[in-house]
Image (cartoon, helix red, strand yellow):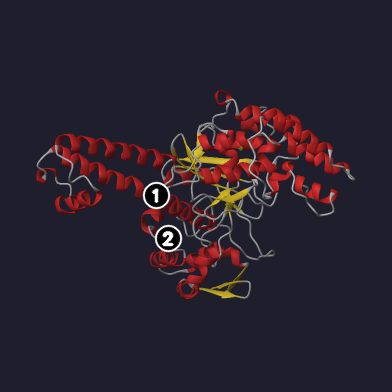
Amino acid sequence: MQWSLEDIYKKQVRGKIPPRKHLRVLGEATEEQTEPDIDSLKEEIKRAVDSLSFDDAREAQKLLAQIYNFPTYKHVKRSLGSKGYSPLIFKRFSADVQRLIEDIPSDSRDQFLAYLQSPDETLVFPTEIREGKLSDLIGDKLDYKLVDYIMRHTGQDEGGRGVGMGELALALTFKNLGAGGRKKKANVAAAQDAVNEAVSEFKANVGNKGFGKDAVKKRIKNTNLDKSKYDNEYTYNLDKAYSDLIIANSEKVKGDLELDGEEFEIKGEGATLGPRPDDVSKRHKKDTANSLANMGIKEQGTGYLVGGQTIAGLNNLPVAISTAYNLSEDQNAFENIFKDFLKVSGEFANIDDHYNSLNFDLSNPASIQNGISLLSFMDYAEKEEFEHFMTHDVGSGGAGSGRYVYVSGKPIEMARKLLESSARFEKVSRSNLRPRIGFGSNYAGMMPTAVNVQETEKITEVEDEEIEYY
């Protein structure tokens, strides 16, 4: 049961709330008052609390926790504001965090507030550690249970994108992490300063006409910023600065966070990488059926039929593909069909470059599972243009122990590092060519070192519907 000051007071007056000065928080209309001093307000708060009676000790405990937790809001807001979050975001999230940690032990809350007020002692997220537990990174600086509470929170940023599952907690915890888009904001601010300076130089050396946006746009269109077409450097500098400002404003915000000013993408347990796999599948049902047929694979009930062999389990598509490949008389032609299948049914735009870099071995089910999973990751990383990525096992459903994997570099470099890590992907099926990432026990584990890693096992009989590849 949840209580607030309003709920407690309503109970005392049987739902009828008379207009009183100490209830201005309820939004009631009151006469304009001279702003009181702090001491008088504190006395009024004491009188307000003294006027309450409690039938349940839990009500009193809840009110006491709210009072002691009151400073949390301003300190969280200040910290998030310094991390580059907009006022809309840090006000809303500060209130969310204040509510989230209301019932934690007072010593943990006090430690958290002291931590937020000591930026010089704040932890740095380590980029040299590839995987481990967040609790080990935090150590005794904070109560990890508190950080865990916040990590399970999910909200939205001003663009409607999901923010949570770790981003907020990590931004509060590590000094070198901040809101995604800080780099863009800095670039826009610098570009605007350059425009202002160019306008001043133009006015001082050319005149008071021709520096407006319409005039600048017209010149840019006519000259295409060819410096040889300008009569003087001041006009060119103004047009160039204005063009740079347009480019800075149009820059896409990449990544959930920024790590030392660079884009950092965070994914919690069971997160999608780009489009939802079911949405992709629905768009290509007919294409998928045709591609499977061309590879000699027929969906049958809850499995596949390949050359007279039954492969049980729709998520054992890699087994069906490898079986069909091994039976094929023209394996080069088969591989071309397989690549077209991924390009169309998986919507992998740069299939040729990415496919070749992953060294698929179609005779090996594990290579197919790993390859498609990493292909999905690379496609996502290339589109979002981030060079830092972390996946962790904390989800809003309450599961997870804070385990994480961190990788960095170009898409292929990050993919190879993921391959060597403990991160896992959902099992691939004809309706899931964009598997979610996580650490779930029912996910397929990544095999070490390379996509092409193990000998194909001959499958004579399938007892279970699902085959594990780890």
Q: Residue 38 is drawn in which quadrant?
A: top right
> Which residue is depicted at the point 70% across and 33% down?
143
Asked whether the viewer can see residue 329, the reply is: yes
The kind of residue tagged 2 is Phe
- Front label number (1 vs 2): 1
Q: Nearer the viewer, residue 411 or 371?
A: 411
Q: Nearer the viewer, residue 408 or 147?
A: 147
> Which residue is depicted at the point 46% across and 71% down?
295
Q: Is residue 140 left or right of residue 446?
A: right
Decide: marks 1, 2 in contact (CB < 8 A)? no
Q: Is residue 448 left or right of residue 378?
A: right
- Provide the residue designation for mark 1: 252
Earlier along the polypeptide chain: callout 1 or callout 2?
Answer: 1
**Residue 330 at x, y percent in the picture:** 40, 68
Q: Residues within 10 Å of mark 2 (few under 14, many from 20)?
A: many
**Residue 192 at x, y percent in the picture:** 32, 40
Give the number of the disc on residue 348. 2
Q: Nearer the viewer, residue 117 or 126?
A: 117
Q: Nearer the viewer, residue 428 or 204?
A: 204
**Residue 297 at x, y percent in the picture:** 52, 72
Q: Secondary structure at mark 2?
A: loop
**Residue 347 at x, y percent in the picture:** 44, 63
